[in-house]
Amino acid sequence: MRKIIFLIYMILVFVLNSTGQDKCLSQGAPKSSTNPPVSDERLKLIENGKAQEKLEEEVFKILNQKRIEKGLEPLRWNEDLARIARSHSENMAKFRFFSHVDMNKHTVAGRVKSFGIKDWKAIGENIGFARNLDSPAISLCEMWMKSETHRKNILDSRYDETGIGVAIAEDGTYYFTQIFMRRR
């Protein structure tokens, strides 16, 4: 199974690279050496957090629309989950790693617990990154919906709350984390 997933990933990377669209992936670590410099305008947005807030809201709206289209209830925004998701995205951006396991070896369950949330019965997480895109939120959501495991989290009827966190690395790479949860 891992070989199949790896093969699919490599095909995806090849297709994206062969079309000149080193754009959006939800597997593998981004390489900063090929990214263009970040514009002054984009840096100003990054510095005041407006870009991240806008992207978080956009992802939230897009993915809730996907749930509604499938006859599911939309997820409720949970600011505590968003803070945890933002923290994970910020760490991935700052320390240049891409994983569901953080530097303290915690998965989403451990991160949520360390922030004091212990009363959940179902929890999940999607992560992704995007670069060199005019619409990173739209592109990331499209990639997540094309990925069986990411789509499964998005459309899982067990979840009723979510938080989304976005961080933008110095090289302009966007890191996304979405946490899904249902409390007891």
Image: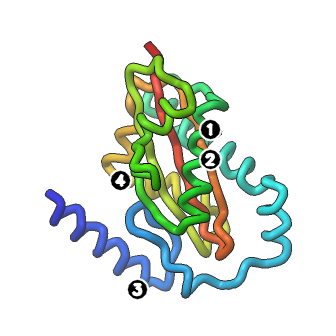
Q: Residue 146 is drawn in which quadrant? A: bottom left
Figure check: 158 above or below 147: above
Residue type (three-letter) at the residue carrying disc 3: Ser
Residue type (three-letter) at the residue carrying disc 1: Ala
* Residue underneath mark 1: 82
Dot 2 or dot 4: first in sequence order is 2
Dot 3 or dot 1: first in sequence order is 3
Residue 154 visible somewhere in the drawing? no
Task: Report how far apart the C-alphas of labels 1 and 2 lie in the structure.
Answer: 6 Å
Residue type (three-letter) at the residue carrying disc 2: Arg
Which secondary structure, mark 2?
helix
Residue 1 visible somewhere in the drawing? yes
Q: Residue furthest front?
A: 104
Dot 2 or dot 3: first in sequence order is 3
Identify which residue, 63 or 175, lies in the foreground: 175
Dot 4 or dot 1: first in sequence order is 1
Q: Which mark is nearer the camera, 2 or 4?
A: 2
Q: Which mark is nearer the camera, 2 or 3?
A: 2
Task: Report how far apart the C-alphas of labels 2 and 4 lie in the structure.
Answer: 22 Å
Q: Give the side of residue 29 with respect to residue 59, left or right.
A: left
Identify which residue, 104 or 157, lies in the foreground: 104
* Residue underneath mark 2: 86
Q: Which mark is nearer the camera, 4 or 1?
A: 1
* Residue underneath mark 4: 147
Residue type (three-letter) at the residue carrying disc 4: Ser
Which secondary structure, mark 4?
loop
